[in-house]
């Protein structure tokens, strides 16, 4: 088969979730409700932290950035999925697909680094309380977030530029609900060995290393005062990502990959407002203060 240049591939078709047509309305309502809850819940976190001076601490500084990232992360994939389900329009332009892939990788990596920063903050607060204000001063917190953004941008940009060099065949159907990098590589007619090498290398840098740092931080904190809620989010988030990108779909079905993707693109951002806020005394107090105004 003679490969076509990527410029001739004007659009892709997102086949979406593996659900029957009669179930479309039910799942559309479900995912719309989950998305709105995710957006409103995380925006509420940002608002409370912004308005209450008692929450102007390193922990809530990182939490506000995590909330913003979760809103953006969900907004990269879920609205397009809902539009496709409602209007039965599966097409997405080539540029739109590449753009979605870039921001998906960017916010995924940013989530990884912010979770690591939060774990380090808890480690310093619990294991070195007398030096906490000195170590976690404002400049250090800003630097951690800035480095997270820079590294995430570099990672996403490297994958995007490499993808732009590939040629695609006539088959433009993506068996997924968003433009996943791994699926796009399978549609290419070009040699993707360099792309796969970068995926593995970047995966070690932005997934494995942050996860090891998180586990080391909580190992120092100790089981008796372990923040189990945060660790549950980390386990769900990293578990699905590692399963997808380090153990590719050659050993598992496409449907299972899609379900796993739903877990960390839809479910994890939905859980964060409840885990980090509703069980947090300071956030509850700020919410009550806001409602009583």
Image: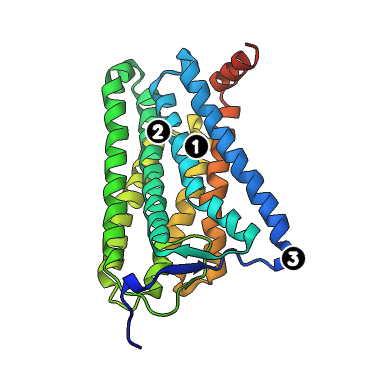
Residue 253 versus residue 120: which sits nearer the camera? 253
Q: Earlier in the sequence, mark 2 or mark 1?
A: 2
Relative to residue 67, is residue 155 depicted above or below?
below
Instruction: Name the residue beneath numbered marker 2.
Output: 118
Residue 219 seen: no
The quadrant in which residue 214 appears is top left
203 vs 144: above or below: below
Q: Earlier in the sequence, mark 2 or mark 3?
A: 3
Task: Find out whether the residues at labels 2 and 1 contact each other: C-beta distance under 8 Å.
Answer: yes
> Residue 59 placed where, x, y %?
42, 26
Residue at 38%, 52% in the rendered image: 105
| Residue placed most toward the observer, 127 or 121 | 121
Give the SS element for disc 2: helix
Tag 3 and tag 1, C-beta contact below 8 Å = no
- Left or right: 157 in relation to 63: left
Query: Which callout, 3 or 1, points at the residue further toward the start of the chain?
Result: 3
Q: Is residue 143 above or below residue 281?
A: below
Contact, mark 2 vs mark 3 (Cβ under 8 Å): no
Residue under label 1, please give it.
230
Q: Secondary structure at mark 1?
A: helix
Q: Position of residue 56 (x, y in %)?
A: 42, 18
The mark lying in front, picked from 3 and 1, is 3
Indicate the quadrant where residue 120 lies: top left
């Amino acid at each position: 088969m003679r490969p076509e240049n990527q410029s001739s591939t004007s659009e892709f078709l997102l086949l979406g979730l593996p659900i029957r047509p009669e179930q479309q309305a039910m799942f559309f309502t479900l995912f719309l409700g989950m998305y709105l809850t995710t957006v409103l819940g995380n925006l509420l976190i940002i608002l409370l932290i912004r308005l209450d001076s008692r929450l102007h601490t390193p922990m809530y500084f990182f939490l506000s950035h995590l909330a913003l990232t979760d809103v953006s992360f969900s907004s990269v994939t879920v609205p397009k999925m809902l539009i496709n389900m409602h209007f039965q329009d599966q097409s997405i332009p080539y540029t739109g697909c590449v753009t979605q892939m870039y921001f998906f990788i960017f916010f995924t990596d940013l989530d990884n680094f912010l979770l690591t920063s939060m774990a380090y903050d808890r480690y310093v607060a619990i294991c070195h309380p007398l030096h906490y204000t000195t170590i976690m001063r404002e400049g250090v917190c800003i630097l951690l977030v800035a480095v997270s953004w820079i590294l995430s941008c570099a990672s996403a940009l490297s994958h995007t530029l490499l993808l732009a060099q590939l040629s695609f065949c006539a088959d433009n159907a993506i068996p997924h609900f968003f433009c996943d990098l791994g699926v796009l590589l399978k549609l290419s007619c070009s040699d993707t060995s360099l792309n796969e090498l970068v995926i593995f290398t970047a995966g070690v840098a932005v997934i494995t290393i942050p996860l090891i740092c998180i586990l080391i931080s909580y190992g120092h904190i100790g089981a008796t005062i372990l923040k189990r809620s945060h660790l549950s989010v980390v386990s769900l988030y990293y578990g699905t990502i590692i399963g997808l990108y380090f153990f590719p779909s050659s050993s598992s079905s496409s449907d299972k990959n899609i379900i796993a993707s739903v877990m960390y693109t839809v479910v994890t951002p939905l859980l964060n407002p409840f885990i980090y806020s509703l069980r947090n005394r300071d956030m509850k107090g700020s919410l009550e203060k806001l409602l009583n105004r």
